[in-house]
Amino acid sequence: MSEQAEQAIETPVLDRYECRSCGYVYEPEKGDDSHDIPAGTLFSELPINWRCPVCTAKKVAFANIGPSGTASGFKENLGYGLGVNKLTPAQKNILIFSALALGFLFFISLYGLQ
């Protein structure tokens, strides 16, 4: 019976929501210090009168952009490319800046040739 109870309890996904007016992202993991919203508060649990702390837009101006650490872009496009589309934004940044640093090192190494 305890297994059924564990299956019935679903952990809510901490999706982030972005203000379409100014680009502010509400992250449930952080909450909202300016309105005394504690960390872990889901967007759906925010008060009706809660507004964007940057531009004071209403809750209806926010769009769900999914949980943090997930691959960005449309789900149907994640299969294209050389596997790069399945990387998270942080992984893409590491890949891009590592390639730039490697290219810079190759360029600087040309000064060693005579």
Image (cartoon, rainbow, N blue to C red):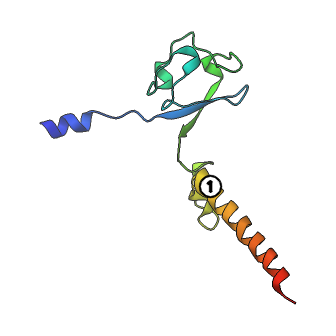
Q: Residue at x 54, y 39 (%)?
A: 66
Task: Please name whichever residue, 45 or 35, is drawn nearer the observer in this view of the structure.
Answer: 35
Q: Is residue 111 found left or right of 90 in the rendered image?
A: right
Task: Please name whichever residue, 75 or 19, is drawn nearer the observer in this view of the structure.
Answer: 19
Is disc 1 surrounded by few (<14), some (14 to 19) or many (20+) residues within 10 Å? few
Q: Is residue 70 found left or right of 82 in the rendered image?
A: left
Task: Please name whichever residue, 94 or 14, is drawn nearer the observer in this view of the structure.
Answer: 94
Residue at the right extreme, as displayed: 114
Q: Residue at x 70, y 28 (%)?
A: 20
Residue 41: % across, % down: 45, 24
Which residue is disc 1 drawn over?
77
Q: Is residue 12 found left or right of 83 in the rendered image?
A: left
Q: Secondary structure at mark 1?
A: helix
Q: Quadrant of the N terminus?
A: top left
Residue at the bottom extreme, as displayed: 114
Q: Residue at x 51, y 15 (%)?
A: 36
Q: Quadrant of the C terminus?
A: bottom right
Q: Is residue 35 above or below residue 13?
A: above
